[in-house]
Amino acid sequence: MGKHRLSVAYNWDPRLIEEVVKNKYPVKDFFASAQHTTVGGGRPSSILPETTEKIMKQHIKKMHDAGIEFMYASNAPCMGGQEFVRETHEKMLKEFEWIQGIGVDGVILAIPYLMELVKEQFPKLKIRVSTVAKVNTVNKAKYFEALGATSITPDVMINRNFKVLEKMAKGTSCDLDLVVTDGCLYECPFRLYHYSLTGHASQTYSNRDAYIDYPILRCNIEKFTHPAEAMKCRWIRPEDLKHYEAIGIHNFKIGGRRLTADIILRSVKAYTEQKYDGNLTDIIEGFSFEYGGVKEDPNKKMGMANATEKKANMVIDNTKLDGFIDFFKKQDCAANCADCNYCDEWAKKAITIDQEGVEIFLNSVHAFHDDLITSREFGLGKAVEGAGRKTKKGGMDWDPLARKNFDEIIGRSPPATRGMARMVIGSLAEKTAKKRGATKVENDDVSIAFLTGVPGPFQKGLKGDLKELGMKCEV
């Protein structure tokens, strides 16, 4: 086992420090930020844990006592030009003074101008280039090194480009910290837009309540419609760290500062031991967006859509992936991905999903997506409940009582999610009827649809409604 070191997401739960120290995990630094900042970061404020200056100082001291550094994430890709407005610029300078004053060792940045500013005015702070800056060539790495960077987190999209990574590791004096837990789509067309959204959604002067995670909706549609896309994502298995150490890279980053300590520690353990005999989606990001977080998504529709991901039950069996990485040492994915079915073949070997659960999940996601692209989410366009992607009746009739009870329960659901619920549950009721060979949707089909299609947090109230209407309350 090589002498690899880990940079780990921090959620302001001190148990992370305690467990790392107790288990002697090779963590060199933690990274995090306050919930809202002047510069902004790579996660929206709405899903980040709250903290205070007192807590931050205490935790950073605890890290230092254990020989672990702390990096402050100020990695928004855009400030909307506010960095050049005197009032905001002054606030930004005070923020960097404060960051330095509470004992932070370095800052993670994506905006080149801020790197030069920090190097000039706050030379005690180390500068790490964020993956948000999309450093994907040796030449670009050299430019950032000249701007003052001491370490670089390369663009995750080159995680399997060994030729470029090896040249980058040897061609600069900067340490490279590879993100190993990234589950974003390969060459994701939504990625730049996503980081722009999250950056503005964490800035003190922006309308943070306006944030809706459209890129996640699109990401989920792609991955759960075409499971091979999950194989193309640029995650790195714990077992494969040795291949990167062989080309001179020994630092690896574990993301997830929106996640609970238990989930983060599960990843830390796996990458420390360089072994994980389980579902890879349990230790990487890009899956399970609603559950596992320290906070729920404030957008109720988004929360409802993502909560049904559990039903899809996507499993990437890590024990079946030995040898998967070898192909990428010689393959040019950027040029040949469209002509290659390598990831498709491995998906057939390693990925299993619950097809019925996938349909429920995708119906939920599509319903919210349709509301966004038709502008109904904003009260514009055709303001018709349940309009858009219509429930596919498939020629089926509904028993009058079943239809009456269905409409009654839908009418009791929150207005924001009513259209989505009508489409998803209605489709599921018809599918349930078809499975038992019926040509008409009956009361029990409606009950089962609600009980299997409504996310866990809403089940208690749902069962009360079903009981009141004399309907089946258990599957």
Image (cartoon, rainbow, N blue to C red):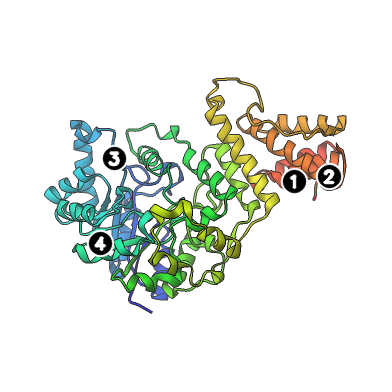
Residue contact between numbered discs 2 and 4, judged by CB atoms under 8 Å? no
Mark 2 element type: loop
The single residue placed furthest to the front in the displayed view is 339
Residue contact between numbered discs 3 and 2, judged by CB atoms under 8 Å? no
Q: Which one is nearer the viewer's eye here, 235 or 429?
A: 235
- Cα separation between marks 4 and 1: 53 Å
Mark 1 element type: helix
The answer to whether one can see residue 463 in this image is no
**Disc 4: which residue:** 168
Q: Relative to 264, is 90 on the left or the right?
A: left
Residue type beneath disc 2? Lys
Considering only vertical position in the picture, is 409 above or below 333?
above
Mark 3 element type: loop
Q: Which of marks 2 and 4 is in front?
A: 4
Q: Considering the image in quadrants, where does the N terminus appear?
A: bottom left
- Mark 1 neighbour density, 10 Å: few (under 14) some (14–19) many (20 or more): many
Q: Quadrant of residue 148?
A: bottom left
- Cα separation between marks 3 and 1: 44 Å
| Numbered mark located on residue 38 in the image | 3
- Cα separation between marks 3 and 2: 52 Å
- Cα separation between marks 1 and 2: 9 Å
Residue contact between numbered discs 1 and 2, judged by CB atoms under 8 Å? yes
Q: Relative to 232, is 161 on the left or the right?
A: left
Residue type beneath disc 4? Met
